[in-house]
Image: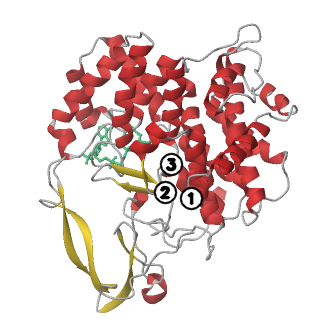
Amino acid sequence: MMPCRVMGMPGLIRRRRPRGGADRTPGSSFCEVPIAMPDKATLTIGDKSYELPVVVGTEGEVGVDISNLRNQSGAITLDDGYANTGSCCSAITFIDGDQGILRYRGYPIEQLAIRSTFVETAYLLIFGELPSRTQHAEFRALLSQHEYLHEDMRHHFEGFPPNAHPMAILSAMINAMGCYQPALLNPDDPEHFTDAAARIMSKVRTIAAASYKKSIGEPWMYPRPELQYVPNFLHMMFSKPNRPYEPDPDVVSALRMILILHADHEQNCSTSTVRMVGSAQANLYASVAAGVCALWGPLHGGANQAVINMLSSILASGETASAFIAKVKDKTSKIRLMGFGHRVYRNYDPRAKILKEACDKVLAKLGIHDPMLDLAKQLEETALRDEYFIQRKLYPNVDFYSGIIMRAMGIPVPMFPVMFAIGRMPGWIAHWREVALSPNPRIYRPRQIYVGPTKRDYVPADQRPL
Ligand code: ACO
């Protein structure tokens, strides 16, 4: 893992600062302000002061290292939901949520989305550099080699009810996959790790397609090694034994781009889960299976599905965009505008920007006029003009438009979070590796402030109320 750089000497660094302070209006520009950055911060609790090291990242992000605070003072920091807590130093992905910047290993997402492939981006995330042509070819060959599932895994599929959610199947089957490769994963052995990473990345799309086929009662389609990653997946999803599916090249490009855009997003809920599980030295399969479970939640990877459900119910009710937005703003309704808002982005999510354009292109190419796209745009326009959304800096996130494109491709709605999981797999693998290779491995174990009952004595059952 990239060691955190603790400032050794006081000095000046250039740090971006929002003009106008915290309540600046969305979209206003930032200026580069040189600020003095001391190497230590001082925290005073009661009449005692503690010096805490200051840590600065390569993009100038500043953190106060409190890892020894409890030893020094007996106090911990409290940050419900971790919104202000750095859980690690990481060299994988950089996000500047105020400016809407996302980079994998330094490369801007806008360049990767248009110019890279999913396999190449996965290699970049996992191993840190774009592959040479030989490395690329070797990694592709490994993906093809591992695309089949062990035949015995069919029995596992048979045990699921036909309406089982594919995310439940996916997480269970990834864990099951580990049973077929019992040799311990050794992240220090590059060949072994590369093989395991390729196995998971390759088989996850085979499992995803098989779970879809199971849900519609069609026979599994075996992968075709001559096909690239994305067309091979589409073949397993949509071919039938008597009817091969030839995907439109624009559909392939759009899906490739969706996978790239989802490939990593630093310490989000599912990635933090993978890192947490991995920190216990759990194997890669167990760790990424846990990531799938976290991703399933509607506030995370399940949001793309929730967006489509929201749009279809608005369309079915005949409600206008403004009427729906009014309901969202009414806190008693508990309705959220799904696909809007983000813990990190307080600006337009750069992935949503790319996907909005792609949405227009793909639907036009496929000759589809989807009223959901019209409604999504109306909701976005209405929300972005509204004080509620402006004040809270709520913008469309990656899920707002991705579902509309996937629907146009014929991907069924319950499979949306699965598509997200396929895309996020390289990021999870990269983060698991970063934890495994950490020079100072430590199990992740947060503290808490206990607010329950203080000590009391046990009451036997016959002395308690009926
Ligand atoms: N619709 C309406 N109001 C919202 C929304 C929304 N989508 N998102 C946030 N808010 C409001 C909150 O009600 C809160 O208002 P308040 O200050 O009056 O109480 C304020 O904005 C801050 O919201 P938080 O919930 O504190 O923001 P947080 O950072 O915890 O949550 C989250 C981020 C979960 C993404 C949230 O914006 C949300 O629920 N969005 C909808 C679900 C969604 O699209 N999830 C996908 C996220 S991207 C991803 O995982 C790939």
Which residue appears at 68% of the width and 37% of the height?
204
Q: Amino acid at mark 2?
A: Arg
Whether residue 351 sits left or right of residue 218 in the image: it is: left
In the drawing, what numbered circle is on residue 264?
Answer: 3
Q: Marks 1 and 3, how far apart in space?
A: 13 Å
Q: Marks 3 and 2, how far apart in space?
A: 10 Å
The color scheme shown is secondary structure
In the drawing, what numbered circle is on residue 105?
Answer: 2
Cβ of mark 2 under 8 Å from ligand 1: the answer is: no
Q: Give percent across and percent down for residue 65.
A: 42, 78
Q: Residues within 10 Å of mark 2 (few under 14, many from 20)?
A: some
Q: Amino acid at mark 1?
A: Gly
Which residue appears at 39% of the width and 27% of the height?
358
Q: Quadrant of the N terminus?
A: bottom right
Asked if disc 2 and disc 1 are in contact, CB closer than 8 Å, the reply is yes
Which residue appears at 45% of the width and 13% of the height?
366
Q: Nearer the viewer, residue 195 or 380?
A: 195
Q: Residue furthest top?
A: 242
Location of residue 341 (image quadrant): top left
Q: Amino acid at mark 3?
A: Asp
Residue 19 higher or lower than 246, as above or below = below
Is tag 1's residue or tag 3's residue first in the polypeptide sequence? 1
Q: Marks 2 and 1, how far apart in space?
A: 6 Å
Ligand 1 occupies quarter = top left
Whether residue 277 sits left or right of residue 318 in the image: it is: right
Q: Give percent across and percent down for residue 4.
A: 47, 75
